[in-house]
Image: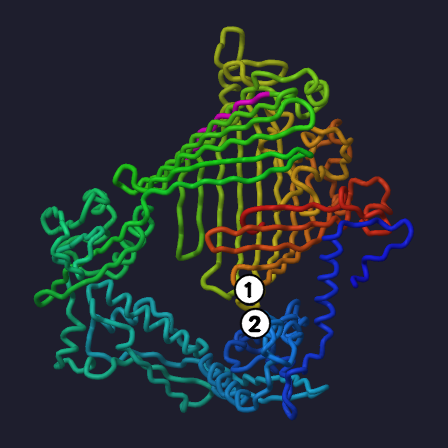
């Protein structure tokens, strides 16, 4: 029986599924207390902990983490550095392996790692070689062990000793071109610490330089290094040589490798591979000089468009860099699924080039249906979208989308919202977006929002960076109707929302920087997102120059606010920074951290930041103990009115999140999280008391929540269900009640939120 089901007097009766969640947490703790050596054979030891200690780490550039991959055996996976949850789950299995419960527990868990003395010797040898490759030829590796309750604590003690340095470096070859390129911009210098990694990079650099000069058959494996460590004083001499008969100027291989090759003809194949013959296949072709174009069915891309993206031309020397640039330019096209570029030797020093393109799925139709819950009202949202990735035969991608939502409200008429959007992305990285949105909330207001955006994107794949420039972001907000009741509640002269519910214009620009260090699965990585945005500066400058008066129909001045064609425009600056880091323990376990900061500041022609540009807190991607738009600003307390969420917007945002993710089985994942954050206002607004950001008190107004959730990861889409529980509620005036516990009145309706979302929160 679950221990949480008995209640004392004055205790809050929590919903049954909340008790089930608490029982599940108790079960996890109970599993961790199971005997970890349950399945360790007699006379053997559980490898409980493995460590690597660099005894002279202060004098080396090597860290323990650098040597961890060379271990042939390590302990069972851990959460938070100590909890062997996977092993604990495995140990819950009955001894009878024919039972279903035993098979499930063993599949979900991880078998105990049994200490193996032979694998320890292999690890010592591999660590020694790794240290020697880093220039520590005299490195030694010893081990120490400690046994307690059949648990083995194993420590590798690595002593690096003195590092060896390169005294002299030279290239031995009769080929002047190789000698000259190898010496130019060499990464090997005298007195640098010896490293086999540096030597390998130098081989790759020299091979690339040679191939860029037309030596198509030159490969890095044709080069070798001789290292002489007998000269004393911890120095080595390094010499580069050619391998095998390539070093012999009279050999056929030498002549082949040291011949410069020129491009002869270039063949483009779209949706047709010349290696696969089909007599019934109808092939169309066009020949333009030394360029040949072949395709089947409808032509995929225009000839001129392909030529503009090919970075080498007939008659030019072969260049490896130009081939790579051509790969990048063609692979980035939305109409192309993959690219293959090959070369064939023809004649003595000529190459024919074959570029094979396979088209991606050009047309795609998308649909979505989801339920919504906002301020106590339920609703439904539907959407449909169509994408054509080659609309003008030049890999231009156009997306047409439409959304509509309907919300059943307790009072007033039901709300309707519709949206239409057109996105056009050109292969030149220009983006054009047009949006039209309509909102109707009977008893409150109706609103039209129109937006035009022009942008440019630069992707630096080699550095995992993306730059997005929206040099024009134009929005016009028009409100044809506003109810008197809504005006009385929110649009009084002292209420900042007054400016958000008047017709206004937003004309600005923004820049977004994105960085993602992800390289391969099961390796830790981080992401950075930075945004800077301004609006209204150009119009404000124009207003100052044109000096509005009664004869100026374009620029005006109304109650101290500049207007353009009688419509006021907003002026503000905005900056955001979001950092995330994924600590990947293995393919099943990871810990994810997130820090998000944002500030929006109104100035000049604006008393407040436009409502649609302000921040909101709570919801599936923020502090999950609160529903969307019900947290903040600061210690602001809702009065309970149904449309009070209009006041719960701010100019400053802070989000801090910690989430543990565990892939239990195939597409089933679970997560546990802790969230903290809030929003604040820049200024002290009368309609948002206790909402202003202050350095000496903002930390006291941080909202905290915790919870757990289920994630169904189907690769193409992730369905997420999270239950968030409030831990600290800054809106409660009684400080003793701000920390939400059962004795403090923790309850479902006020302190817990359930979220259904698509995708991970960060």
- The residue singled out by tag 1 in the image is 665
Q: Report the side of 231 relative to 298 (left or right).
A: right
Residue 448 shown in magenta:
yes
Near-viewer residue (173 or 48) = 48
Residue range in magenta is 446-454
Residue 316, horizontal then vertical, whole percent: 16, 56
Q: Which of the colour schemes (rainbow, by chain, secondary structure, one colour) is used? A: rainbow
Among the 4 quarters of the image, the one containing residue 258:
bottom left
Which numbered tag is attached to residue 645?
none
The answer to whether 542 is drawn above or below residue 379 in the figure is above
**What residue is at 11 percent from the left and 51 percent from the top?**
290
Look at the numbered discs 1 and 2 and tell me whether their residues touch, using CB distance below 8 Å: yes
- The residue singled out by tag 2 in the image is 107
Residue 177 shown in magenta:
no
How many residues crowd around disc 1 within 10 Å: few (fewer than 14), some, or many (20 or more)?
A: few
Residue 33, horizontal then vertical, whole percent: 73, 74
**Most frequent secondary structure within the magenta stretch:** strand
Residue 362, horizontal then vertical, whole percent: 31, 44
Among the 4 quarters of the image, the one containing residue 60:
bottom right
Near-viewer residue (673 or 755) = 755
* Mark 1 and mark 2: Cα distance apart in space: 8 Å
């Amino acid at each position: 029986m679950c221990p949480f089901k008995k209640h004392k007097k004055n205790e809050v009766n929590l919903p049954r599924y909340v008790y089930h969640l608490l029982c599940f947490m108790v079960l996890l703790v109970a599993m961790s207390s199971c005997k970890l050596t349950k399945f360790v054979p007699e006379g053997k030891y559980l490898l409980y902990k493995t460590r690597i200690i660099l005894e002279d780490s202060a004098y080396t550039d090597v860290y323990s983490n650098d040597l961890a991959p060379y271990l042939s055996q390590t302990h069972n996976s851990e959460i938070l550095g100590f909890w062997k949850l996977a092993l604990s789950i495995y140990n819950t299995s009955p001894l009878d392996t024919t039972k279903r419960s035993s098979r499930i527990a063993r599949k979900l868990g991880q078998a105990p790692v049994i200490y193996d003395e032979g694998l320890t010797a292999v690890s010592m040898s591999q660590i020694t070689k790794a240290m020697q490759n880093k220039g520590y030829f005299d490195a030694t590796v010893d081990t120490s062990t400690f046994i307690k309750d059949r648990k083995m604590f194993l420590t590798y003690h690595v002593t690096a000793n003195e590092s060896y340095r390169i005294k002299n470096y030279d290239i031995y070859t009769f080929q002047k071109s190789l000698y000259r390129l190898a010496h130019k911009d060499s990464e090997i210098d005298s007195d640098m610490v010896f490293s086999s990694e540096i030597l390998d990079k130098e081989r790759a650099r020299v091979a690339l330089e040679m191939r860029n000069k037309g030596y198509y058959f030159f490969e890095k494996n044709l080069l070798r290094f001789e290292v002489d460590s007998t000269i004393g004083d911890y120095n080595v001499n390094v010499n580069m040589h050619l391998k095998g008969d390539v070093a012999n100027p009279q050999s056929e291989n030498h002549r082949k490798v040291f011949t410069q090759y020129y491009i002869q003809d270039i063949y483009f194949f779209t949706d047709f591979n010349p290696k696969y013959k089909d007599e019934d296949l109808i092939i169309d072709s066009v020949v333009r000089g030394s360029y040949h174009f072949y395709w089947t069915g409808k032509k995929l891309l225009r000839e001129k468009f392909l030529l503009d993206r090919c970075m080498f031309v007939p008659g030019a020397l072969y260049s490896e860099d130009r081939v790579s640039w051509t790969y990048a330019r063609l692979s980035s096209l939305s109409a192309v699924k993959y690219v293959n570029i090959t070369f064939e030797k023809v004649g003595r020093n000529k190459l024919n080039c074959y570029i094979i393109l396979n088209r991606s799925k050009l047309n795609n139709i998308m649909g979505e249906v989801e339920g919504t819950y906002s301020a106590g009202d339920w609703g439904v949202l539907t959407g449909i979208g169509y994408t054509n990735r080659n609309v003008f035969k030049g890999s231009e991608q156009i997306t047409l989308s439409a959304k509509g939502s309907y919300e059943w409200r307790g009072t007033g008429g039901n709300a309707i919202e519709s949206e239409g959007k057109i996105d056009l992305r050109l292969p030149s990285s220009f983006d054009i977006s047009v949006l039209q949105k309509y909102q109707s909330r009977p008893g409150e207001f109706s609103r039209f929002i129109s937006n035009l955006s022009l942008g440019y994107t630069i992707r630096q794949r080699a550095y995992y960076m993306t730059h997005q420039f929206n040099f024009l972001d134009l929005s016009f907000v028009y409100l044809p109707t506003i109810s008197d009741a809504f005006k009385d509640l929110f649009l009084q002269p002292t209420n900042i929302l007054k400016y958000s519910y008047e017709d206004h214009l937003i004309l600005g620009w923004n820049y977004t920087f994105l960085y993602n260090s992800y390289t391969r699965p099961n390796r830790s990585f981080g992401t950075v997102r930075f945004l800077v945005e301004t609006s209204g500066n150009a119009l404000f400058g124009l207003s100052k120059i044109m000096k509005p008066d009664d004869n100026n129909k374009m620029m005006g001045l109304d109650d101290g606010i500049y207007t353009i064609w009688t419509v006021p425009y907003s002026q503000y600056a905005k900056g955001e920074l979001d950092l995330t880091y994924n600590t990947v323990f293995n393919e099943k376990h990871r810990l994810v951290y997130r820090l998000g900061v944002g500030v929006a500041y109104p100035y000049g022609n604006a008393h407040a930041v436009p409502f649609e540009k302000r921040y909101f807190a709570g919801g599936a991607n923020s502090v999950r103990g609160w529903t969307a738009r019900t947290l903040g600003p600061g210690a602001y307390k809702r009065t309970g009115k149904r449309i009070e969420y209009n006041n719960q917007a701010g100019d400053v945002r802070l989000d801090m999140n910690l989430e543990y993710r565990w892939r239990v089985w195939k597409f089933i994942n679970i997560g546990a999280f802790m969230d903290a954050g809030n929003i604040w206002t820049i200024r002290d607004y009368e309609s948002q008391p206790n909402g202003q950001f202050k350095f000496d008190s903002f930390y006291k107004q941080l909202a905290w929540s915790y919870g757990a959730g289920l994630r169904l990861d189907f690769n193409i889409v992730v369905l997420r269900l999270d239950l968030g529980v409030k831990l600290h509620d800054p809106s409660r005036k009684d400080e003793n009640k701000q920390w939400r516990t059962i004795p403090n009145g923790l309850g479902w309706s006020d302190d817990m939120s359930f979220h259904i979302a698509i995708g991970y929160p960060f």
